[in-house]
Image (spheres, rainbow, N blue to C red):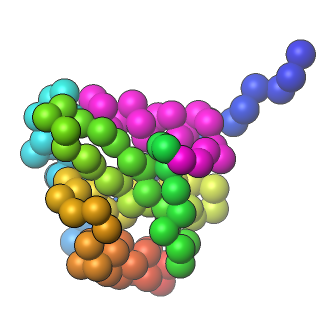
Amino acid sequence: MPARAQILSVVFFATTGGNEPVRDWLQDLPKGDRREIGADILAVQQGWPLGLPLCRSLGKGLWEVRSTLSSNRIARTIFAFDDGVIVLLHGFIKKTQKTPTDDLDIALKRLKDMRR
């Protein structure tokens, strides 16, 4: 019988002030959207490594969970790894084809803060 895959832990990035921006973003979303994003993050936890269509590398140590929400909306949750733990760095509702530079910059800044 094959060994059961290890489920990765997930934590929210926390600012020096203790705020958790991704948790706050999720709590502001409708319950159905939170449920869909949570299910996608759980799939990454349980099935890592995964690729498209659910997950892809953004480079520079960043990865994204790609969630399709109701009303044809798309959410992205950007994460990185820290000692085998998934750290949720940034989340947003995607409005353009390309991931906005501002959102990547936010995630990169948080990644840098996390590694200090």
Residue at the far top: name it.
1
Residue furthest to the right? 1
User: As rendered, which of 112 and 19 lies closer to the eye?
Assistant: 112
Q: Which residues are magenta?
A: 34-52
Answer with the quarter of the image where residue 108 lies.
bottom left
**What is the total number of numbered labels drawn onto the structure image?**
0
Q: Quadrant of the N terminus?
A: top right
Taking depth in this image into account, of 113 and 91 the one nearest to the observer is: 91
Q: Is residue 2 magenta?
A: no
Q: Residue at x 19, y 38 (%)?
A: 72
- Residue 37 figure quarter: top left
For image coordinates 17% across by 59% down, the residue present is: 95
Q: Is residue 84 above or below residue 35?
A: below
Residue, x 19% and y 27% (percent of image)?
32
- Dominant SS in magenta: helix
Determine whether, in the image, residue 4 is placed left or right of residue 69.
right
Residue 26 at x, y percent in the picture? 20, 45
Residue found 27% across the figure and 29% down from its top: 35
Residue 7, position as x, y percentages in the image: 62, 36
In this rendering, the answer to whether 38 lies above or below 24 is above
Residue 69, given in percent of the width and then of the height, sits at 23, 36
Q: Is residue 94 left or right of residue 44?
A: left
Q: Is residue 9 visible?
A: no
Out of 36 and 14, give the one closest to the viewer: 36
As drawn, 95 above or below 7:
below
Image check: 49 left or right of 44?
A: right
Q: Nearer the viewer, residue 98 or 55?
A: 98
Residue 101 in view here: yes
Where residue 23 appears, x then y in whole percent?
Answer: 24, 50
Residue 46 counted in the magenta span = yes
